[in-house]
Amino acid sequence: MELRVLRYFLTVAREGSITGAADFLHVTQPTLSRQLKDLEQELGKKLFIRSSHSIILTDDGMLLRKRAEEIIEMVDKLEAEFYSMEDTIGGDVYIGGGETDAMRQIARVAKELQLRYPNIRYHLYSGNSDDVTERIDKGLLDFGILIQPADLSKYNYINIPAKDVWGVIMRKDSPLAIKDTIIAADLLNVPVICSRQAIKQTFSKNEFADWFGEDFYKLNVVTTYNLAYNAAIMVEEGIGYAITLDKIVNTSSDSNLCFRPLEPRLESGLNIVWKKHQSFSVAADMFLKAIQAKF
């Protein structure tokens, strides 16, 4: 299976037609069609449903698209790493993480390093713990920022000297907005918007379940989310109250939203992690040394 053919396949999947993909790739339509037919024969699977004007991916085609994107991304990353192995220190550092104000500390380290080595570039990926660790395991990310609790058994890690405070985002005209803090009983009779990571039973210790106590399963969870920006929009539109971290949603004086911390106070620590026995690019290794020196 050639990388060139995988790139052809991804272009056809993106453009939605052989004609559009052939124009983009500067190849003839018969050449492109033959390459795709050979790919289907090689895999023994039908990848497209063809019509007169467009193509639609089959389930097997969707799977190949996901895997091909990962393969091409890995190849591009590898080429960039070897390209950076020159006298001038530079290259790419890939960092993933959830939404957290602790990213400011990572950004400050990156800024200090950039002043010394301006040819280092950073690529950020936002996602929850599952998204980030999957990409670390596949080699698509160098580092991940994980909000506790998280399974760190497979990784080397450093504690980030910061704590995220949990609370509730609500409209300023909401009945609970008059309170300074939110207790568990306040949330039992209102629609709740909650992080999927926070409510899933993956870890032996679930801080949210412990905080809510025996009433945890009585929560009326009307929406789940993995990133808070869209959750905040749902709150603005009156869908419910979002349980989230402080400082990642705009709750300033010009916003319609406000934040109220949980009582008793609930905080989560953070770790920056990387694979054990990881072979880093020059740029990623410099970033790791800077993180270790800082924290």
Image (cartoon, rainbow, N blue to C red):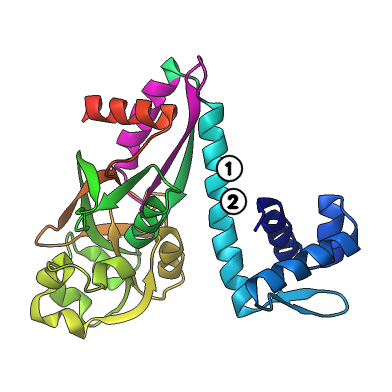
- The residue under label 1 is 76
For the magenta stretch, what is the residue range? Answer: 85-114
x and y percentages locating residue 138 in the rendered image: 42, 53
Residue drawn where x is 52% and y is 47% of the image:
74
Q: Which labelled disc corresponds to residue 132?
A: none
Q: Are marks 2 and 1 in contact (CB under 8 Å)?
A: yes
Crowding at label 1, few (<14), some or many (≥20) Cα neighbours within 10 Å? few
Q: Secondary structure at mark 1?
A: helix
Looking at this view, name the residue that lies furthest to the front. Answer: 42
Q: Secondary structure at mark 2?
A: helix
As drawn, 274 above or below 120: below
Of 192 and 128, the residue lying toward us: 128
Left or right of 46, for residue 59: left
Quarter of the image for the C terminus: give it: top left
Instruction: Give the residue type that dot 1 points to.
Output: Asp
As drawn, 117 above or below 1: above
Residue drawn where x is 34% and y is 72% of the image:
193
Left or right of 250, for residue 82: right
x and y percentages locating residue 216 in the rendered image: 16, 79
Question: Which image quadrant is residue 132 in?
Answer: bottom left
Instruction: Give the residue type that dot 2 points to.
Output: Ile
Residue drawn where x is 23% and y is 81% of the image:
219
- The residue under label 2 is 72
Residue drawn where x is 50% and y is 14% of the image:
87
